[in-house]
Amino acid sequence: MKKIIIFLIVIAAVVLIGIKGKGLLDQRQDEVKNIPLPLTEAITVRTVTPRTGTLENSISLLAQVLPQKSIKLSTKLAGYIKEVAVEESQTVKKGDLLLRIDDTEMRSSITSLESALATQKSDLALAENIHARNQKLYEIGGLPKEKLELSALSLQAKRSTIESTEQKILQLKHQLSYLQIVAPFDGVVDALLLHQGDLAATGKPIMSISTVDKKLLLTYAPDKATVIKPAQRILLEDKEIGHIKSLYTTAKNGLLAAEVALTTPIAYPSGSSITVDILTQSHQGCMVPTDSLIHKADGAYIMRYSENSFTAQKVTIQAEQSGSAIISPCPTEPIARATETILTSLPAYTHVKVITEKMSGEADAH
């Protein structure tokens, strides 16, 4: 019985060893099968040494060119336009005459009041003489006190009348300035809405004028509200032209808006639309070209070149923009640039011609 048990144990051990051996054999066969066969054909690959750099992410948005300030001028007093002293698109300085409104009626009123004032002053002089005479008569007892008081009241009334007339003249002369409209600031005449001979009504626009200095108005969908922030830099054709000054709190037609303060003048006329880039993020670190990256299911890789061979290294892509990427960790050796298919198969090639390339594009072969 004991021999039978030993025999069965031996048989079981043999079977177990056979199963494990077959498993190891299958595993080895799979490994051999997956090893790329050496490729004898020659291939040329460029390599580049990573460098420290800054990568900025940006988005493109439509912007409208607007003047810094734009107003429509009107008159406080109605009248017919006598003269328009400027033309559309004309540049003006603060205080320059823009137009005159007919002031004939007002000047006639001033002349009439000045004539009346002269008469009133003559009457005042006469009343002063009468009052002075009455004062002397009253002092010697030749005039009742009531008549002295009446002459004093008459004298005061005439003085009040003169003061009222002088005030009216001053008001009319001040209103004359309303009939001469001057430029409130340095700018450009955008449009003439009324012309010589037209009736300028109170509060009705006569012309529009705007500043030469411009600003941009960005419009964007609400889903970008978390991306657009004050102080972000604005680029036009890869040149920085300003920054976001403020975010508007109200939407128009479902779009949000932001105002851009320009630090560099632009040649676009007011009202035109242009596409600008907004720098939303800035990353600094190890910079490599994007055609040096291999994207796999488990992450990104680069092919390091050292001692005449290529080795894969897993990296983390921190930012990617315009053909460049920021990665970590940063390899100290040159890395290969090619299509992902070629990069993946580089270890299998036996003959690789390497062209060392700098980030600026300068290269030498070996």
Image (cartoon, grey):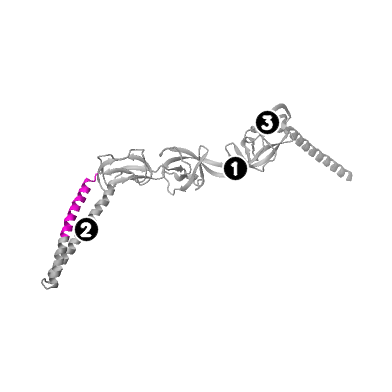
Which quarter of the figure has residue 316? top right
Q: Amino acid at mark 2?
A: Ser
Work out how far the residue at label 1 is from the one at label 2, CA to CA, in angstroms.
Answer: 76 Å
Which quarter of the figure has residue 54? top right
As rendered, which of 301 and 307 lies closer to the eye?
Answer: 307
In the rendered structure, does residue 103 fall within the stretch colored magenta? yes
User: Could you classify mark 3 by the number of other residues whose Cα lies within 10 Å: few (under 14), some (14-19), or many (20 or more)?
Assistant: few
Work out how far the residue at label 3 is from the one at label 1, CA to CA, in angstroms.
Answer: 26 Å
For label 3, the residue is 364
Range of magenta residues: 102-124
Is residue 118 shown left or right of residue 187?
left
Is residue 21 shown left or right of residue 205?
right
User: Could you classify mark 1 by the number of other residues whose Cα lies within 10 Å: few (under 14), some (14-19), or many (20 or more)?
Assistant: some
The secondary element bearing badge 3 is classed as strand
In the rendered structure, does residue 211 fall within the stretch colored magenta? no
Which quarter of the figure has residue 116? bottom left
Work out how far the residue at label 2 is from the one at label 3, CA to CA, in angstroms.
Answer: 97 Å
For label 1, the residue is 54
